[in-house]
Amino acid sequence: MIKDITLGQFFPGDSVIHKMDPRMKIILTVVFVAIIFVVKNFLGFAVAAIFLASAVLISKIPVRTVLKGIKPLLFIIIFTAFFNVFYGTGVKVFPDISWLSWLTYGGLERAVFMVIRIVLLIIGTSLMTYTTSPVMLSDAIERLLSPLKHLKVPVHELSMMMTIAMRFIPTLIDETEKITNAQKARGADFETGNIIRRAKALIPILIPLIVSAFRRAEELADAMECRCYNGGDGRTRYKIYNFSLRDYIASIIMLAVLAIVIVINIFF
């Protein structure tokens, strides 16, 4: 399960999406999230899914890798679907079975609706991190939030914190896997017993992981201090970003998808 976590990972490539301005990718991701929440029927989801599938194919990220990122969140998806079933109304699916009389077609439709929404959200937001390096992502966030500097908001520090946090997710995952394998080699059992026993079995993993995380944070702070890091004041930029034709085309396509979804909501 730990190997399936792809959150925060970057897959280098030369696709059109990789070459897009990171600021535009963040903006389009926000618009896509808005589209997912605007959708009110399955036809709208079909349009969003076709657009997202096309983006994944263009990015050249393996479909297996994209789907693997859903696996760690499978419990949350099932949990959400299970509880949404109870909020449905309409015709009962099994009217003759007393202990299943609460199950309705409206509940099933609502559960499927929420599952599709969550899956599209996960894939859509993950595609941005798959195709954007942490450095580029940090720089893009800082530039998009730069107007907040006039309100004394520490934009550079916030973007740096977000980037470091995302960068250390794969590192902590690898560290967790190493600690788990080491504990298993010492005879630890993480797969048998009830929930309480399994929770107690995680203690030999969590304690070394927390200690390792604090040690890495301290080493990073010392390294930044030794290099005289003092924030964004007076710093020059290695790369200057400019919107290109591909960015404008992508924005037009995204706006077209949004318009189609709105039309579907109105007339269907």
Image (cartoon, helix red, strand yellow):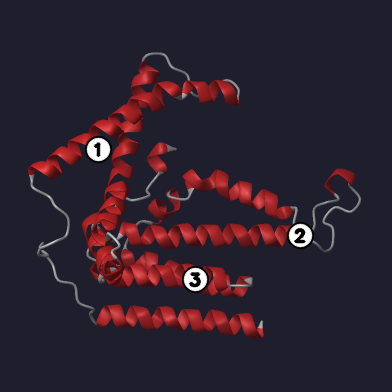
Q: CA distance from mark 1 to mark 2?
A: 47 Å
Find residue 252 and report its horizontal and vertical position in percent: 38, 83
Q: CA distance from mark 2 to mark 3?
A: 24 Å
Badge 3, how many Cα within 10 Å: few under 14, some, many 20+? few
Badge 2, how many Cα within 10 Å: few under 14, some, many 20+? some
Image quarter of residue 110 = bottom right
Asked if the residue under mark 2 is in contact with the one under mark 1, i.e. CB atoms within 8 Å, the reply is no
Image quarter of residue 182 = top left
Name the kind of residue labelled 2 in the image: Gly
Find residue 82 and report its horizontal and vertical position in percent: 68, 49
* Quadrant the C terminus occupies: bottom right
- Residue position for label 3: 34
Tag nearer the camera, 1 or 2? 1
* Quadrant the N terminus occupies: top left
Asked if the residue under mark 3 is in contact with the one under mark 2, i.e. CB atoms within 8 Å, the reply is no
- Residue position for label 2: 88
Badge 3 marks a residue whose secondary structure is helix
Residue 217 bears which disc, if any? 1
Q: Residue at x 31, y 68 (%)?
A: 151
Q: Residue at x 56, y 82 (%)?
A: 262
Tag nearer the camera, 3 or 1? 1
Give whichever of discs 1 and 2 has the lower sequence position. 2
